[in-house]
Image (cartoon, rainbow, N blue to C red):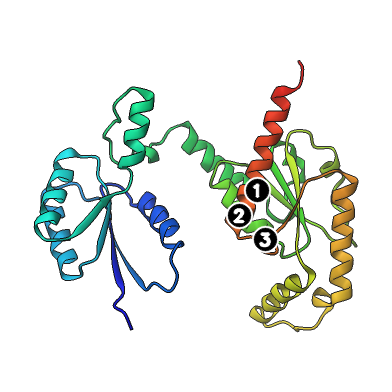
Amino acid sequence: MPEPLHLHLLSDSTGETLEVIAKACLAQFEHVDVLRHFWPMVRSEGHLDRVLDDIERRPGLVLYTLVNSNIRRELEQKTRRRGIHAVSVLDPVVHALSAVLGQEAKGRPGRQHALDAAYFARVDAIQFTIAHDDGIGSENWEEADILLAGVSRTSKTPTAIYLANRGYKVANIPLVPEAPPPPVLFRVKHPMVVGLTTNPDRLIQIRRNRLLALNQAPETDYVDLEAVNAELAFARRLFADNDWPVIDVTRRSIEETAFAIVRLCNERIDAAREMPA
């Protein structure tokens, strides 16, 4: 078996940016055994030396985001002397932005995590979304940016939370043929209502796994093919009757579903801007 790749993620902030970039890049390779090592908040030469000693014992690739010029220079010189390959992952984008914008980048560690208005809006969105999970708080649905509707186990809650972390206020509504949703769902003006659907066989598999995890009977109407088809048909009719966009989540990750919803939101905003006043 080949030796695992030691991937060292070194940052003078939290390292979240590095983690996202590393994950995206590694997804392009198959059958690679990677051991990630996180080195956040490296803001002094002494700390850097201790980290480099450990990296030298487990050599591999160093990805870094360092805005302090002195620490950067120390890292570059010392990794070069020790024969360690190091890459500054943000430099190409920062340099390009600097050239296009005609200004120098501000060298502040963790600047993207500053407690600005966007940060507090995101916190507000997360709180709203958690408080309006699974059909709760219908009296406040008009305040939402997005309403997700779908039968049980169509990824409504995780998709809502993912969107909330990006600043969208989201409520999600379970669709049950025996209990139609509140009338307010059909009167909302501000939020965009999106229907989520999926393949019945896949849905039954997910539901059966859920029942097993809860130590409940694995054979009920909840996983009966005829009953599940009826549920999905009910939801599809509701989506069509109200002209709501629909996303099939069968082969989509949570991230892919969320990005599709964001695209729909942006298209809706663009269309509204183009309408005559």
Q: Residue at x 73, y 72 (%)?
A: 202
Count of numbered tags: 3
**Circle 3 — which element?**
loop
Residue designated by label 1: 260
Q: Residue at x 85, y 52 (%)?
A: 181
Residue 6 disc label? none
Tell me the quarter of the picture where residue 215 sits. Answer: bottom right
Evaluate if marks 1 and 3 touch, with contact meaning CB atoms under 8 Å apart: no
Residue designated by label 2: 256
Mark 1 closeness class: few <14, some 14–19, many ≥20 residues within 10 Å? some
Q: Residue at x 68, y 75 (%)?
A: 210
Marks 1 and 3, how far apart in space? 14 Å
Q: Is residue 179 left or right of residue 215?
A: right
Three-letter amino acid code at the position of disc 3: Ser
Three-letter amino acid code at the position of disc 2: Glu
Image quadrant for the N terminus?
bottom left
Three-letter amino acid code at the position of disc 1: Ala
Marks 2 and 1, how far apart in space? 6 Å
Q: Position of residue 71 (x, y in %)?
A: 16, 45
Residue designated by label 3: 155
Vertical relation: 257 (above or below) 119: below
Q: Residue at x 20, y 67 (%)?
A: 59
Q: Is residue 64 left or right of residue 250?
A: left
Could one spot residue 145 in this view of the protein? no
Q: Position of residue 92 (x, y in %)?
A: 33, 41
Mark 3 closeness class: few <14, some 14–19, many ≥20 residues within 10 Å? many
